[in-house]
Amino acid sequence: MSLSPALYATWSPRLLGLLRIILGFLFLQHGTAKLFGAPHVAMFDGLQLLSVMGAAGVIELVGGSLLLVGLFTRPVAFILSGQMAAAYFMAHAPNGFLPILNGGEMAVMYCFTFLYFAAAGAGACSLDGLRGKAGA
């Protein structure tokens, strides 16, 4: 069975937008857990704002929020991709290079999904689209 190009043209931006919204929501939770303790994650108890993890929380809160609404999607996604690459090499790779063995699978997935958004743009239902910069 072959799908028509018109079907792809209709659904690709919508699914890209849905993926961006879901990913932004998931990533935003990392920032709120680190900075506000909600949802509560025990390993973030006593986190200092002026630390690597505190800075990561700020980036995750701001970047996740902007990604969720699709504002400045390309540059934000590029920054978030870099953050996740750094997280992988700082926190996971020292425990062995393979992500399945060092617990870094999600960092790698986030890194490359954000990199995709940096190239593809926001998709449908974004503030970039309302600003006339749907690919921004």
Image (cartoon, helix red, strand yellow):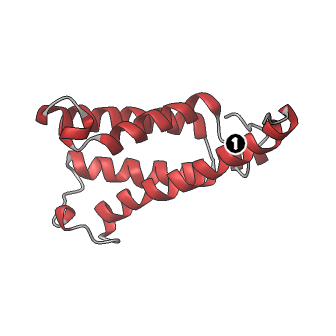
- Can you name the residue that lies furthest to the left here? 95
Graded by Cα atoms within 10 Å as few (under 14), some (14 to 19) or many (20 or more), the crowding at tag 1 reads: many
- Which image quarter: residue 9? top right
> Which element is circle 1 on?
loop
Residue at 70 percent of width and 49 percent of height: 126
Q: Where residue 98 sits in the image (x, y, percent)?
A: 23, 31
Q: Quadrant of the N terminus?
A: top right
Residue at 73 percent of width and 52 percent of height: 125
Image-based side of 86 in relation to 43, left or right: right
Q: Amino acid at mark 1?
A: Gly
How many numbered marks have been drawn onto this rendered protein structure? Answer: 1
Residue at 67 percent of width and 34 percent of height: 136
Q: Where residue 110 sits in the image (x, y, percent)?
A: 42, 41
18 relative to 35, above or below: above
Q: Where residue 48 sits in the image (x, y, percent)?
A: 19, 57
- Which image quarter: residue 86? top left
Q: Where residue 55 sits in the image (x, y, percent)?
A: 29, 47
Image-based side of 12 in relation to 107, left or right: right
User: Which of these two is toward me, 127 or 104?
Assistant: 104
Residue, disc 1: 123
- Which image quarter: residue 61? bottom left
Residue at 20 percent of width and 48 percent of height: 51
- Can you name the residue that lies furthest to the front here? 1
53 relative to 84, above or below: below
